[in-house]
Image (spheres, rainbow, N blue to C red):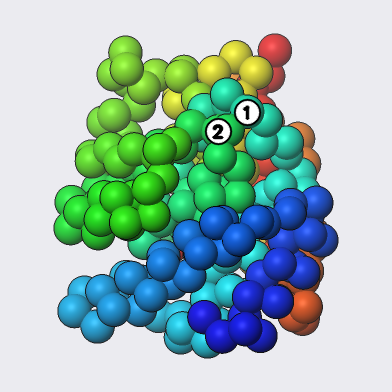
Amino acid sequence: MTSKDIDKLKKGASAFDISLDSRQIKAFETYAEMLETKNQVMNLTRVKPADYVDLHFLDSLSSASVQAFKPGIKVLDVGTGAGLPGIPLAIAFPGIEVTLLDATAKKLRFLDEVIEAVLLKNVRTVHGRAEELQSLPAHSRKYDIITARALANIQTLAGWTLPFMNRNGIVIAYKSVEIDEEIKASKTELHGLRGKIVGETRLRIPGTDIERRLITIARIK
Ligand code: SAH
């Protein structure tokens, strides 16, 4: 990362009330380097390294504007892929416990390398399909916050994520702006899962013109 990237990352994070110290910045740098290198031999991201800060790191951290990542809370990142948004959240909030879930073992092996290189003590990886792991006692209703970015439409995503959510848990779906139809189409499925959309926050990734919509889903009490 260039010094301009680092500046952008610090400033952008502070827009979400996150202050990053030098160790955390170093962690993002190591992660960025490893992602760039590994992406040459396997398909992890289509985003160019120059855009990692905007399109991956700050975008991942944007959920801090809709939900507090308090120490001790358990976060599950479903379909984490290259570790997004899970790794940036784990770096920014060392007190949370992050589980990175993906169906592709190769991607998790890369993430295990990142966890080791960055010395991330608050992250673990779990391999499997969400729809299979969600009913296991170790995972069913065990998480406070479930994140999902670029995973599936809301209807499918709800089926894959809601069963992981504990009583007061929340799902945060990272979506683009044009999703009114998708929201409409998901109503029946959500109702069947006793879930409900409780928030639709529009925001701009700091320092860019890129808009994002964060959809939050909770359980009907
Ligand atoms: N969240 C990342 C990756 C998105 S690509 C990002 O925003 O960049 C979607 C990822 O979800 C892929 O890595 C794929 O392996 C994983 N995936 C797709 N269906 C899944 C399922 N049913 N259970 C677990 N992981 C799944």
Q: CA distance from mark 1 to mark 2?
A: 5 Å
Question: Could you tell me the amino acid type at mark 1?
Answer: Pro
Instruction: From the image, tell me which residue sits under label 1.
Output: 71
Question: Is there a contact, CB below 8 Å, between mark 1 and mark 2?
Answer: yes
Please say whether residue 57 is visible from this viewpoint: yes
Instruction: From the image, tell me which residue sits under label 2.
Output: 96
On the picture, is 97 further left or further right than 213? left
Q: Report how many numbered discs are placed on residues in the image.
A: 2
Residue 47 % position (x, y): 46, 80
Please say whether residue 180 is visible from this viewpoint: no
**Residue 113 occupies quadrant:** bottom left
**Residue 208 occupies quadrant:** bottom right
Which is nearer the N-term, disc 1 or disc 2? 1
On the picture, is 11 further left or further right than 124? right
Q: Which mark is residue 89?
A: none
What secondary structure is marked by label 1?
loop
Residue at (45% x, 24% y) in the render: 163
Image quarter of the C terminus: top right
Residue 156 % position (x, y): 45, 45
Question: Could you tell me the amino acid type at mark 2?
Answer: Ile
Residue at (28% x, 37% y) in the render: 126
Q: State which image quarter holds ligand 1.
A: bottom left
